[in-house]
Amino acid sequence: MVVRTRLAAILIPLAFYVFSGVVGSYFVYHAAHGQRGLEADAATRKEMAEIESRLKAVRAEEDYWRNRIALLRGPEIDRDLLDEQARTLLDHVGKSDLMIFLPTVSAETTGATTRR
């Protein structure tokens, strides 16, 4: 009886500590590596930074085009821009214009967006 009591006095707290350690380890592991853990949070923040940089670039391009459209609309039209657009769309060249032919480079090779 004494042996069983001593054995129970040692094994029951030991089992409790082992079980508590396993449960605590489970929660700590998933807090770091789980679906909503620290690593997932870091990946989400990185993705957010990339998306915000793309948004900034798109907004800059939008401002560029809004400015160009504003120059072609309104009470007074920018004559230089209108002339440039007409020559580009109609492939028209003036008599006194100097033509310089450049090799065509696709946007895929340069990685840049083309603006007309």
Image (tube, grey):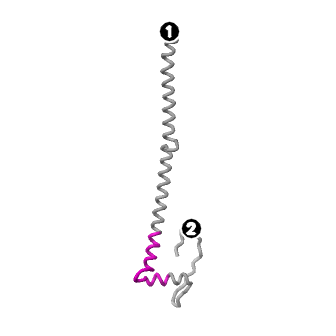
| Label 2 sits on residue | 110
| Label 1 sits on residue | 2
Q: Earlier in the sequence, mark 2 or mark 1?
A: 1
Secondary structure found at label 1: helix
Residue drawn at point x = 49 percent, y = 13 percent? 6
In the picture shown, does residue 93 fall above or below 103? below
> Horizontal and vertical percent for residue 20?
48, 28
> Horizontal and vertical percent for residue 101?
57, 80
Q: Is residue 63 magenta?
A: yes
> In the displayed image of the protein, which residue is found farthest to the top?
1
Where residue 70 sits, quadrant-wise, is: bottom left
> Horizontal and vertical percent for residue 105?
59, 72
Residue drawn at point x = 47 percent, y = 60 percent? 53
Q: Main secondary structure of the magenta part?
A: helix
Could you give the CA–CA distance between mark 2 and mark 1, rounded to whole angstroms? 85 Å
> In the displayed image of the protein, which residue is found farthest to the bottom?
95
In the picture shown, does residue 1 fall above or below 101? above
**Contact? badges 2 and 1 (CB < 8 Å):** no
> In the displayed image of the protein, which residue is found farthest to the left?
75
Q: Which residues are magenta?
A: 62-84
Residue drawn at point x = 49 percent, y = 41 percent? 32
